[in-house]
Image: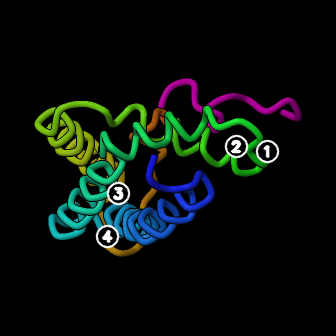
Amino acid sequence: MSRTPEQLVADLETLLRPLELELAEAWWESNTQSSAAADARRSVADLARRDALSDAHVFAELRAAREVDGLDPLVHRQLDVLYDMFAPHQIPDHLRRRLVEGETAVEAGVVSASDGRRGRGVHRGAASGASGVGAAHDRPSLGS
C-alpha cells in the first residue's frame, strides 16, 4: 500500500466528488428535460463515475487499508463505505458500458412516457404505477 488510509480516503474524495456532482446534475437534467442530449450527458457522467469506481488497483488498496490495525473509527467507516462503492464495479469494461446504456435507455423511456411536457416538470406517477386502478386517488377515503 503506497498511501496511508487517511490519504487514500482524501484522494478518493478528491477524485469522486466532481464525478458525483456531475452525475447528479446530469441525472436531474435527464429527468426534467427528457432530451437525447440530456440522456447522453447522463450516460457519459454515469460511465465516468463507474469507470473510476472500477479501478482494480484502488480496490486492492481499499481492501488492504481496511485491515490496518488501530485506524481511527471514522477513517475505518469511510474506507468501508468506499469499499462498498467500489465492489459492485469490479466487472469487465464491456459489461459496465452495457449496464449504463441499458439503464439510461430504460430511464429515458420512463421519463418520456410519464410526461410529454418538456421542461415543465416530470410526473413519474403513471410510469411508476401510482395512477390507474388501485391508486390512492381511486380508493374511497375513510371520510366518505
Visible in this render: residue 121? Answer: no
In the image, what residue type sits under mark 2? Arg
- Sequence-first tag of 2 and 4: 4
Q: Residue at x 49, y 41 (%)?
A: 62
Circle 2 sits on which residue? 77
- Sequence-first tag of 3 and 4: 4
In the image, what residue type sits under mark 1? Pro
- Sequence-first tag of 1 and 4: 4
Between 42 and 82, the one lying in front of the other is 82
Q: CA distance from mark 2 to mark 1?
A: 6 Å
Circle 4 sits on which residue? 33
Q: Residues within 10 Å of mark 4 (few under 14, many from 20)?
A: many
Q: Residue at x 46, y 46 (%)?
A: 1
Left or right of 105 in this view: 72: right
Foreground label between 3 and 2:
2
Visible in this render: residue 15? Answer: yes
Circle 3 sits on which residue? 115
Q: Are marks 2 and 1 in contact (CB under 8 Å)?
A: yes
Q: Are marks 3 and 4 in contact (CB under 8 Å)?
A: no
In the image, what residue type sits under mark 3? Asp
Residues drawn in magenta: 132-144
Q: Quadrant of the C terminus?
A: top right
Left or right of 69 in this view: 51: left
Q: CA distance from mark 3 to mark 2?
A: 41 Å
| Secondary structure under the numbered disc 4 in the rendered image | helix
11 drawn magenta? no
Foreground label between 3 and 1:
1
Circle 1 sits on which residue? 73
In the image, what residue type sits under mark 4? Gln
